[in-house]
């Protein structure tokens, strides 16, 4: 059996605690998160890194946000409330987002480290940055900032 990642193990432990406390709502949400992490671990056929786990949690959080919007448009506040609960629960397992200043500083370091000078070098810079910002910054925001710095 493959080794569990640190975040997955924490979610499993919290799920056990919720089960013992009789908190069915929390237990069900945590089980769904574990299932998503387990699926990713099996599909990738490698030991998960923290960045891999954060990518899965970020994807699941985005799905919850989209579902909230759809449920609210349909007038299903009960389902929207459940999705909001799960989205907030997911957020508690994710690191704090990087601020604009910290993100800009990291982009500058990435450009310097990869010796990038033109927009064609954007892939090198993004490859250098991705593991360093995993789960802590929006990919689109990051690529827009790199593109702007490289004059693209």
Image (tube, rainbow, N blue to C red):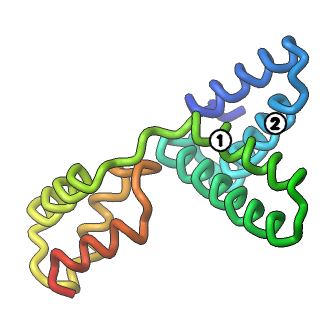
Viewer-nearest residue: 43 or 29:
29
Residue at 32% across, 75% down: 144
Which image quadrant is residue 18 in?
A: top right
For label 1, the residue is: 88
Q: Tag count in the figure?
A: 2
Q: Which one is in front, 124 or 11?
A: 11
Q: Position of residue 51 (x, y in %)?
A: 47, 46
Quarter where residue 73 is shown:
bottom right
User: What residue is rendered at 13% in x and 73% in y?
Assistant: 116
Badge 2 marks a residue whose secondary structure is helix
Q: Is residue 56 above or below residue 34?
A: below
Mark 2 against mark 1, which lies toward the viewer?
Answer: 1
Q: Which one is earlier in the sequence, the residue at label 2 or at label 1?
A: 2
Circle 1 SS class: helix
Q: Is 64 placed left or right of 144 in the picture? A: right
Q: In 3D space, how far apart are the residues under numbered discs 2 and 1 (Cα atoms)?
A: 15 Å
Quadrant showing the N terminus: top right
Residue positioned 56% across, 42% down in the render: 48
Q: Residues within 10 Å of mark 1 (few under 14, many from 20)?
A: few
Q: Name above or below for residue 93 compared with residue 98.
A: above
* Crowding at mark 2 (Cα within 10 Å: few <14, some 14-19, many 20+): some
How far across and down, in percent of the image, does residue 32 sit?
80, 43
**Residue extending furthest toward the top:** 20
Task: Tell me whether the residue at label 2 lies in contact with that at label 1, contact meaning CB atoms closer than 8 angstroms.
Answer: no
The residue where tag 2 is placed is 31
**Quarter of the picture holding the C terminus:** bottom left
Q: Looking at the image, which residue is at 78% across and 24% down? A: 15
Residue 76 falls left or right of residue 55 = right
Instruction: Point out residue 44 in the picture as x, y percentages from the top left corner.
Output: 63, 54
């Amino acid at each position: 059996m493959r080794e569990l990642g640190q975040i997955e193990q924490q979610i499993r432990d919290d799920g056990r605690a919720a089960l013992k406390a009789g908190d069915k709502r929390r237990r069900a949400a945590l089980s769904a998160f574990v299932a998503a992490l387990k699926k990713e671990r099996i599909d990738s056929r490698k030991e998960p890194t923290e960045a891999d786990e954060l990518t899965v949690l970020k994807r699941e959080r985005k799905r919850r946000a989209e579902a909230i919007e759809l449920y609210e448009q349909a007038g299903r506040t009960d389902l929207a409330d459940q999705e909001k609960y799960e989205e907030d629960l997911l957020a508690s397992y994710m690191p704090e987002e990087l601020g604009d200043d910290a993100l800009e500083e990291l982009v500058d370091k990435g450009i310097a480290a990869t010796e990038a000078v033109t927009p064609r070098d954007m892939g090198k810079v993004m490859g250098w940055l991705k593991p360093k910002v995993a789960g802590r910054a929006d990919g689109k925001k990051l690529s827009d900032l790199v593109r702007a710095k490289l004059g693209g």
